[in-house]
Image (cartoon, helix red, strand yellow):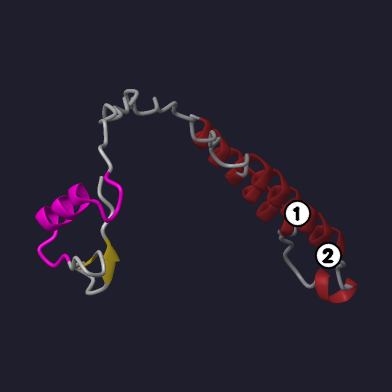
């Protein structure tokens, strides 16, 4: 309905502008003799045109449709249950003093590349490491 009303008002403004620019039709040679001055008619037509454009654009351009800002949607954070960290129970570590008979037995039984003269073994990295029992 609003759009229809805007169209009617705009059409009326254009029609008024067009009608104001026409002069009165006269028969005869009077216009030749007196050089009839139509400046007032042209000025009225121009004023009507300007008025029609201003009013029509003011009615037609109401700022467009109201566009609301996007709604913020609350997103529930994901639930992560509390992670429990279980520490291994302390184990009684039996360490052996280096160069004792127990230490030799442990290192020979654990490492195939154990060298009893230097107390070292060759690790997977290709380097020699001292045997630490325990």
Viewed as shown, does residue 91 lie left or right of 49? Answer: left
Residues at circles 2 and 1 in contact by the CB criterion of under 8 Å = no
Front residue of this view, candidates 84 and 120: 120
Viewed as shown, does residue 12 lie left or right of 20? Answer: left
User: Residue 7 location in percent, x, y?
Assistant: 54, 41
User: Residue 68 location in percent, x, y?
Assistant: 54, 33
Looking at the picture, does residue 4 appear above or below residue 112? above
What is the secondary structure assignment of the residue under circle 2?
loop
Looking at the picture, does residue 89 appear above or below residue 55? above
Question: How many numbered discs, if any?
Answer: 2
Whether residue 131 appears in magenta in the rendering, the answer is no
Distance between the alpha carbons at the discs numbered 2 and 1? 18 Å
Viewed as shown, does residue 101 lie left or right of 81? Answer: left
Front residue of this view, candidates 74 and 90: 90
Tell me which corner region of the image, top left, top right, bottom left or bottom right, holds residue 64: top right
What is the secondary structure assignment of the residue under circle 1?
helix
Viewed as shown, does residue 116 lie left or right of 90? Answer: left
* Quarter of the rendering occupied by the C terminus: top left
On residue 17, the disc is: none
**Which residue corresponds to the image point at 80% horizontal and 54% vertical from the top-left?**
47
Identify the residue position indicated by label 1 in the image: 50
Identify the residue position indicated by label 2 in the image: 38
**Which residue corresponds to the image point at 53% horizontal and 37% vertical from the top-left?**
67
Nearer-N-terminus badge (2/1): 2
Mark 1: few, some, or many residues within 10 Å (few <14, many ≥20)?
some
**Which residue corresponds to the image point at 66% horizontal and 55% vertical from the top-left?**
18
Front residue of this view, candidates 15 and 29: 15
State the extent of the magenta-drawn residues as a range. Answer: 96-114
Tell me which corner region of the image, top left, top right, bottom left or bottom right, holds residue 128: bottom left
Front residue of this view, candidates 73 and 28: 73
């Amino acid at each position: 309905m609003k759009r229809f009303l805007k169209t009617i008002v705009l059409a009326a403004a254009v029609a008024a502008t067009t009608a104001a620019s026409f002069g009165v039709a006269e028969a005869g040679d009077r216009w030749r003799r007196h050089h009839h001055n139509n400046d007032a008619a042209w000025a009225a037509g121009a004023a009507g045109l300007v008025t029609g454009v201003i009013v029509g654009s003011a009615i037609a351009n109401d700022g467009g449709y109201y566009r609301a800002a996007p709604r913020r949607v609350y997103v529930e954070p994901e639930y992560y249950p509390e992670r429990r960290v279980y520490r291994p129970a302390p184990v009684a570590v039996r360490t052996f003093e280096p160069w004792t008979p127990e230490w030799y037995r442990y290192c020979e039984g654990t490492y195939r590349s154990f060298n009893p003269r230097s107390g070292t073994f060759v690790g997977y990295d290709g380097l020699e490491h001292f045997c630490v029992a325990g």
